[in-house]
Image (tube, rainbow, N blue to C red):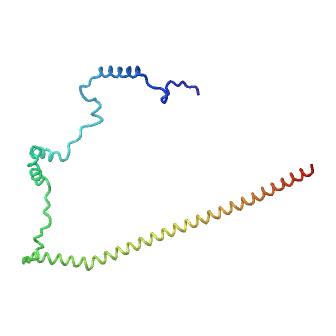
Amino acid sequence: MNRAIDYLPYIDSVSDQYIQQVEQNIAEELEKTTVDGPHPNLNQLFPVANECKWQAEYNLYRETVAMNTDKDKRAAEDELLTKIKRQCVGIDMSRYDATSTDSKVLASMVSYLRHEDIVVSKLLPKTVQNQWLINKDYIENARATIEDLIHTQQQETDKLNRYRQQVQEWEALTFRYLKSQWQDKLNKNIEKSLQN
């Protein structure tokens, strides 16, 4: 392979004159270029983002909260959140007051306690029983899968051992044949040397 090598990166070094020439060429090229704005193809690479779905809330935040000082900002944020955020009324705890004499409240409590009793006495044992049955079935399937895997591996091991035995028996015949040939040649060589 005839190839001219004009640069050896581990031996050669770049001359200062060459570096100055490159820097001068770059400076001249930059002087010719106008940089009064971003490159025209930049908008294709980074298109203008669509309006955020929370833009109205953000604008409201900027108008009402962002102008406040740090002290008033937290209170203004809380006030704004109560306007924007969907309020969940939660659980009315007065319905479950045990000291109440109102018949509707007591009926709600009795209904809740009856529901709790049914869940604990009937549904929970069934759930535990179903969970136990599901787990038992899963463990039996896993055990069967592992036994199949062990059986398959045992068959493969037996097959491999039979193959090894066949190869060793075949090679033993070859080895005996070569040994007998070697002994015959050795005996012939000894006989020749004794005759001479």
Residue 40 location (% of width, % of height): 28, 29
Q: Residue at x 22, y 41 (%)?
A: 50
Camera-side residue of 96 and 126: 96
Q: In which quarter of the image is residue 177?
A: bottom right
Task: Please indicate whether residue 151 sits to the left or right of residue 42 in the image.
Answer: right
Q: Which residue is drawn at 44% across and 72% down?
A: 140
Q: Residue at x 27, y 23 (%)?
A: 34
Please tell me how many numbered marks the rendered image carries. Answer: 0
Above/below status of 152 relative to 63: below
Camera-side residue of 155 and 25: 25
Residue 166 location (% of width, % of height): 68, 62
Q: Residue at x 28, y 76 (%)?
A: 124
Residue sitting farthest toward the bottom: 121
Above/below status of 68 relative to 30: below
Camera-side residue of 142 and 72: 72
Task: Please indicate whether residue 155 sits to the left or right of residue 68 in the image.
Answer: right
Task: Please indicate whether residue 106 sits to the left or right of residue 23 in the image.
Answer: left
For the N terminus, give its image quadrant. top right
Above/below status of 8 relative to 88: above
Residue 103 location (% of width, % of height): 8, 78
